[in-house]
Amino acid sequence: MQKAILLFILFLFVFCFLSIILIRSPFFQENYGWRLEAIRADIKYALDPPEQVIFTPERTSEATPMPSILSPTPTATIVLETAEPTPIPTATFPPTQTPTPMPESANLNGILHQFQMWNNCGPANLSMALSFWGWKGDQRIIADILKPNARDKNIMPYEMEHFIEEQTELEAVTRVGGDLDTIKAFLSSGFPVIAEKGFEGISFDGWMGHYQVVTGYDDNTETLIVQDSYKGPDQIETYQDFIDQWRAFNYTYIVPFPTERRQQILDILGLQAFDNYNNHYAAQKSLDETTSQTGRDLYFAWFNRGSNLVALQDYTAAASAYDTAFTNYEQIPEEERPWRMMWYQTGPYFAYYYTGRYQDVINLATTTLDAMSEPILEESYYWRAKANIALGQSESAIEDLELCLEAHPDFSPCLTELRSLGSEP
């Protein structure tokens, strides 16, 4: 009898051990992990509806505000910036330019469509865009580098740009404040465009962020052709629907291109090729939209205003814009609230941190992480740690930095902060 019990215990131990290995295996995570995550999310969100969670800024400073627009952003944190793209140097423009009339339509062929794996929207879309230029990899290669933790919720535009610059023979430009004319100019010149935008109305709970590769347009029908990693290839979207969802991400777009076609990119961008001009232009565009939009779009407009001011390092004005955005968020009907917004953008952390509002940084990060079905968000852990360091709470900071590195192994900002505290991962 004792022997049978011991054999049963041994069998149970081996079974559990092998089950853990199987569940953690790339094969299982790729094919079935999303089902477990969906079940976990359904239970979490049923018990604690995330659309009911409200962040209310305290608007008080715990310290003298950090330097604003006249001082550079510290090197340790600039890598996290999402609103200020890498500049394109050596721009040359003639004194006057006569715009070349664009054709009524364009349709680029040659992209290899990929349906995204679980949590893999960014890598899938980047892989599609790169395939146009002959890149032979797929989304797995990109994900292994940019999101070593498969449960990571998002890849930022700057991370995608860095991959293009460092892992391929192509270059890339990322800009904000985009418009349809600019997208059509790129398409008619033979450049696919990656757009970051909102996404909803499918079989998941509420609004979320998404990428699409735009490959064509038709002025006669006022539609775009997009390669969608979730819906499928050659999807048709109206101009207005595209703009309405694009607004949620400050009209951000990324264009990969071969080095020998750099001048063509500069000619299309014009003054938008210069970071300072682009950020000022986008700041004005978002300010204009604060007077023309209502409801959820008004929230997006104020949020974009804050992000553009962060890029200009005007942190005090940015913090005020974000305060207004969060105030407007409360007025949005629950079923329309973009409660995943802080999964994808970090601008409020910059604004509150560099105005000495450390408790707001902590509260916002905590609110964001607590509302997630699984708190896998390295940027929120990083900024909460930074705020705790500023308040002299080193133990809490170390805990957050270790959680950051669990969410994203080798994430350099967290490694740097952790070592500055005398700790090693």
Image (cartoon, grey):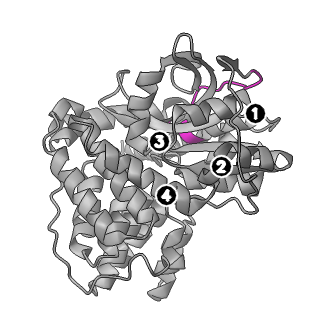
Q: Which of marks 2 and 4 is in front?
A: 2
Residue 377 in percent (x, y) is at: 41, 55
User: Could you say where residue 106 lies in the image, as x and y percent from the top left?
Assistant: 69, 20
Q: Which residue is more in the foreground, 364 or 60?
A: 60
Q: Distance between the residues labelled 2 and 4?
A: 14 Å
Label 3 or label 2, whichever lies nearer to me, is 2
Q: How crowded is mark 3: few (under 14 residues within 10 Å), some or many (20 or more)?
A: many
Crowd band around label 1 with a 10 angstrom C-alpha radius: few (<14), some (14–19), many (20+): some
The residues tagged by marks 2 and 1 sit, at their Cα atoms, a distance apart of: 27 Å
Stretch in magenta: 109-122
Q: Mark 2 points at which residue?
A: 270
Displayed quadrant of residue 27: top right
Label number found at residue 154: none
Kindly give the residue lying farthest to the front in the view shown.
96
Q: Where is residue 8 in the image (x, y as percent from the top left)?
A: 41, 41
Residue 251 is marked as 3
Question: Residue, x 47% and y 42% (percent of image)?
Answer: 251
State the quadrant of the N terminus: top left
Query: Considering the numbered disc 2 on the image, is that residue within a helix, a strand or a loop?
Result: helix
Q: Is mark 4 on a helix, strand or loop?
A: helix
Query: Would you say 362 lies left or right of 91 here?
Result: left
Q: Main secondary structure of the magenta part?
A: loop
The answer to which of marks 2 and 4 sits earlier in the sequence is: 2
Amino acid at pointer 4:
Asn
Residue bearing mark 4: 279
Residue 336 higher or lower than 255, as above or below: above
First of labels 3, 4 by sequence position: 3
